[in-house]
Amino acid sequence: MTQTTQAPQVNTSAATRLDLGGEWELTWSAGPDDVPEAVRTAAIPAQVPGEVHTALLAAGLLADPDVGWGELAQQWVGHSHWVYRRHVRWSPTPGARTDLVADGLDTIADVYVNGRRVGAARDQHLAYRWRVDEALVPGDNLVEVRFASAWDAAREHERAHGPLPSPYDEPYPHVRKAAANFGWDWGPHYVTAGIWRDIRLETYAGRIDHVRPLVRLDAGHAVAQVTAHVRVDAPDGSDVRVELTDPAGRRAGSAVGTVVGDEAAVVLRVDDPDLWWPVGLGGQPMYGLRVELEHIGVVLDSTAVRVGLRSVAVEETPDPLGTRWALVVNGRPVRVRGYNWIPDDTLASRATPERVAHRIDQAVAGNANLLRVWGGGHFATEEFLNACDERGVLVWHDFLFACAAYCEDDEMVELVTAEAEQAVARMSAHPSLVLWCGGNETVLGWRHWGWPDQMGVRGWGARYYLDVLPGVLARLDPTRPYVPNSPWSGSLDRDPAVDTHGLSHLWDAWNERDYVHYRYHDPAFVAEMGWCGPPAWTTLGRVVVGESPGPDSPQTRHHLRAIDGMHKLTRGLQPHVPTPRGDADWHFATQVVQARAVSAGVEWLRSRERCGGAVVWQLNDCWPVISWSAVDSEGIEKPLWHALRHSFAPRLVTIQPVNPGPTHDPTGDEGLVLVLVNDADASWSPDVLIRRVGLDGREHARAQVRAECPAGGLVRLAVDPEVALPADPRAELLVIDAEGVRTTWAYRPERELAAPSPERTVGVTVVDGALHVTVGAVTLLRDVCVSADRLAQPLGLEPSALAVDDALRTLLPGESQVFRITRRDGRAIPQDRAAALSTALLDESVRSFGEVTGSIGNSLRNKGTS
Ligand code: BMA
């Protein structure tokens, strides 16, 4: 008998992907007694990707949980079990297999095809793939995803393994799901479930799992080497063809690699590469990689990725205080001006790619150059990273651990390893991603929050930060720097809370002291610092129902989660401003103090030679809340955002005390220093006008300074004591004007200043489709703001539809300032609309800090509309 060996039959058609997104049917299957009857019996249309919450909201089965006490009335959602169902037509392809691929299931789910269990999910952060062709039948098929309560599963794990210490009374570290989904000090408890990412059927004879293009530059940046690691699931004898195109779309090289095991590595060389740079330092050219998987001349699958050519490193340099820490891109130290990023919505599907891109635009418009994706949320989406690539925004990404001890049992280690492998592989193409970090405040927690006593000999997570995660990076992406935690002082043996080494979180100012205390720190790098303040008045007003949204309103307090938050807000006001009389005054005062606080801290840090950067806590919000954010949940910039736009400007002029001293009295012996900070790559010599003026507007002294500040450098100039030292610190201010930007230095806290009652004029016109609100200073006006959100309603617009171009302007008597208010959608405001804005509304919408004293009374003179 002759035996013929046959090559395995390989399907000759390319892999196909059948999207299962769109409408599914959602039903409740089990849960607590307070589940509404209507929910128990309903077949609810549910959009996929999406959450149970968003489906219930769309079906009118859940009241808006953001509003009033709504959050408390929806806890049953998170304690329930749910089933998603849909039908799909399928027919077998000879020689090909079919997988069900879920890019994200939240969180504990069993998956069925035609009643047969095909897989189980246990981790929200993982993508899952199950072979399903044996369960599928030609024609109609039923796919079901049955979710159990992640909350209950976490409690079960807690009972089985013992409690894990964390600052919140929730079992979040017991389940691999976004920590903040169980409530945080800025976020609600909406414990979600659902098919929250794409889901599809993939049919293939061979497929590309992922492409990891690792980029290396030679020392002179004359040559870039791109090694495309292509992971495949393909028949033996397959090849991978990689084609490179330059940023202009021209072919720049190609190479073929043989698949060995499940991977092919293809090396491409780029001479004279067009480098990718962080925003402000150059362009963001992107090269293209087209990858084909071939088997005996047949293309089984193909994909395309974009790559940016750049190098990145962390430079740790010993200095007399400790160890400096700086990010270096393409050999150039980049001083970081960043924001921390939290999930943009607790209900993730509402954070659409457009909304996220807009939020990143707000970071860029606010002069930030880095976002830190914090470890209590999710891994960044492709859309997020694409937007950062295109804008030159650096991304620091935490692995998903936050503020808790984490179990090191086998199942957790397996899940965390898989998460890291997927995330590192998926994100490796993005030039914006420059740093991986093991987690948030977990080493700090171990050191300072009493965990060793509670954990005993149990593993608390160090294995992840020091072994598992760096191990994954060493295997999959050794081109990016890794830091085991934030904060971090260089080793587990050194207290992460010290400022002297590496990464710091500066929280004493907000938690315990006044903001002048930022100036007692001289850290190497600040990864977190922040101060709470309310969202826009209209944002708070929308969710505080039937009460004035002031500090005494129970619903306002419900929308404030900072530990001891109201007390800290009040303490923050005390040194600076008399107790506000009404709710609107309180709102404005707390917003302005938030802005002044963080801005003071950032300018201090930028004026310090050794500080490699400041990452402010936090850019965004996930629901309407009083929080540390610069932009509220409706996308409205708080005064903080405007203040930081100035303090984060690549070129900054700032006045600082030479030595902050215990009393912060710059009239002490060391005086004031003018600091020019130049993050741009050309030298800079601005004209700086420094004037000491009385609060009545009279000028007492002036100096004109011109100094050269080198590219990427910093210059300190002592201010002539004749100008710097006031005759009466309660009645004078230092006013610094440089290149159209004004900053001021007060010698005493606001409440001690002998300021005249503010008098102002306000006029409004429409110019070129924009509202121009002109504020004229009759007396000195400090920190003038116009709340554009309050002007929207009479114009028939949503509060978030309008944006104002500036805030917190200090005007000397006789000066005026035009605040330009435009529609965010770019449409014009009709000429005749100014008349719709009443004098009373303008009065409420224009505020300056001195008015918080309640002394404005009838000294306020409005011109009204014109
Ligand atoms: C930081 C963060 C968050 C928290 C924030 C404000 O330490 O890491 O956990 O929300 O402080 O308290």
Image (cartoon, rainbow, N blue to C red):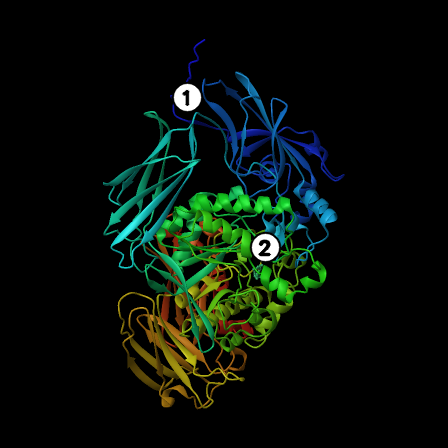
Secondary structure of residue under mark 1: loop
Find residue 220 and report its horizontal and vertical position in percent: 26, 59
Specify the quadrant that holds the N terminus: top left
Within the image, what quadrant is residue 782 found in? bottom left
Find residue 91 and report its horizontal and vertical position in percent: 49, 17
Specify the quadrant that holds the C terminus: bottom left
Q: Is residue 152 left or right of residue 285?
A: right
Ligand 1 contact, mark 1 (Cβ < 8 Å)? no
Q: Which residue is mark 2?
A: 463
Q: Is residue 595 left or right of residue 392?
A: right
Would you say residue 439 is visible in this rendering? no
Instruction: Identify which residue, 635 or 181, lies in the foreground.
Output: 181
The label on residue 10 is 1
Within the image, what quadrant is residue 710 found in? bottom left
The structure residue drawn at horizontal position 52% and vertical position 41%, both measured from the top left corner, is: 349
The structure residue drawn at horizontal position 60% and vertical position 52%, both measured from the top left corner, is: 180
Secondary structure of residue under mark 2: helix
Would you say residue 456 is visible in this rendering? yes
Q: Amino acid at mark 1?
A: Val
N-term mark: 2 or 1: 1
Instruction: Identify which residue, 666 or 445, lies in the foreground.
Output: 445
- Residue neighbourhood size for the residue with mark 1, other residues' Cα within 10 Å, grouped as few (<14), some (14–19), many (≥20): some
Q: Does 301 appear above or below 857?
A: above
Find residue 189 and report its horizontal and vertical position in percent: 64, 49
Find residue 574 and report its horizontal and vertical position in percent: 59, 75
Extreme residue toward the front, this view: 1
